[in-house]
Structures are given as C-alpha cells and as structure tokens.
Amino acid sequence: MVAESEDTEDERFTIECPPVLTTERLVLRPPHEDDIADLAFLADNRHVAGMLARMPHPYGEAEARSFVAMSQNKQSGAAYAVTKADNGAFVGCAGLNVTDRGLELGYWIGEPFWKKGYATEAAHALVDLAFRVTGTNVLHASCRVINPASRRVIHKCGFQYAGQGMLNSIVAGQVPVERYRLDRKTWVSLRTWARS
C-alpha cells in the first residue's frame, strides 16, 4: 500500500493524550514503575512476543523498565497500561505508534486475560482517541496472518483490509502480516450509526 501524502504529515501525529482513558471495564493509563513486575510476568510469554514486532523473548525486569521509560516519550506516540477498572490488575498494553505508514494502533493482552474482550475494548478507546485528538485521516493496524484473535479485534473496530506485507519481529524474524486501515469518514459513520 502506498501512503497518501496527507497520511504522513508529522504534525498530524502530535498526540495530546489524556493521562487516563476509561471504558466500561478498563482503565488505560501511563505505564509506571509499579507495573514492572506484572509487565515482566505477562510479557515473558513466547505466544505474546511472537505476534509482535518489538517485544523480545525472554522478557524480564530490564526490558520492562526500558519500556516504562520509553513510554514517557510522547514523540513516538502514546502508550498505555491496560488495567481492570474493578481492581487495577495489569492485563497488557495498548497504544498509538507513529510508523512510516502513519499512525498505527497496537495492543497486546497477557495470556491469563485472553478471550475476555479486553483487547477490543482497549482498541475501541484508542481508535476514538486517535481521531479525536489528532488530525490523522487514516489509522492503521496490522496482525500476523496466524493471529485470528487480533484480526477479530481489528474487524470489530471497523478497519478494512488493505493488503499484506512483511514484519520484522524480534522473536519470529520476517513474518507475513495483514494490513488494515480505518479512515476518518468511516469512523464517523460507525460512531453515528452506533448512537442511532
């Protein structure tokens, strides 16, 4: 896919994010030092890391500390710890990242919390955030072709298939991915339809 010129203008990706996003069951907030143990525990899972580009395996306290420190850099996007609203349990991470294709949605949920709808709930909140606080006209997402759970999350958020490509994963090497895009007009239509 060739990026449209308006999709790659840097000023469109300045993200003035609220420090906390809330959904029905989740609180998305900046990762902090208190998350390091839970982050290291949940991220040290080859099933999780193998589906992502930048997560190493094994994943320990040093990697968790590095991620928390890096998440403070707003130039590269916005990173959130995904936590349960009822008890504050750390369940994963989600964010908006600036890539060569434009603004991209990313997320991962720890395996003990799979199949509970948390990824979809967090992704919906971040899609809304992306179109509300940035000037981007297109939001991107991708998933490995062998990851049907992530594909379902992407579809539930209204993204449309845009083709295939390759991803360089730290754990899995060069792997095929499906690429998706959601434009602002479609997002507005979906939001309007949901209210009627």
Image: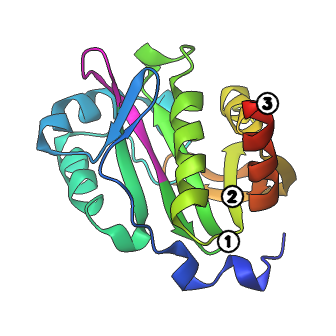
Q: Is residue 44 visible?
A: no
Residue that badge 3 annotates: 196
Instruction: Say left or right for 74 vs 105.
Output: left
Q: Which mark is residue 140?
A: 2
Q: In the rendered structure, which segment of residues is drawn in magenta?
A: 83-95
Q: First in sequence: mark 1 or mark 2?
A: 1
Residue that badge 1 annotates: 101
- Inspect the image, locate mark 3, and give the three-letter code of the amino acid beneath it: Ser
Q: Judge the density around disc 1: few (<14), some (14-19), many (≥20) Cα neighbours within 10 Å.
A: some
Circles 1 and 3: CB atoms closer than 8 Å: no
- Inspect the image, locate mark 2, and give the three-letter code of the amino acid beneath it: His
Single out the mark in the foreground, 1 or 3.
Answer: 3
**Within the magenta stretch, is there residue 23?**
no
- Inspect the image, locate mark 1, and give the three-letter code of the amino acid beneath it: Arg
Q: Which residue is painted at 56% across and 58% down in the image?
A: 132
Instruction: Say left or right for 193 vs 153.
Output: right
Q: Which residue is painted at 19% across and 36% down in the image?
A: 35
**Residue 182 x %, y %:** 76, 54
Single out the mark in the foreground, 3 or 2.
Answer: 3
Q: First in sequence: mark 1 or mark 3?
A: 1
**Within the magenta stretch, is there residue 92?**
yes
Q: Secondary structure at mark 1?
A: loop
**Residue 189 x %, y %:** 81, 47
Q: Secondary structure at mark 3?
A: loop
Instruction: Say left or right for 4 vs 21.
Output: right
Tell me the quarter of the picture where residue 27 sits: top left
Q: Which residue is painted at 60% across and 48% down in the image?
A: 127
Q: Considering the image in quadrants, where does the N terminus appear?
A: bottom right
Tell me the quarter of the picture where residue 10 sits: bottom right
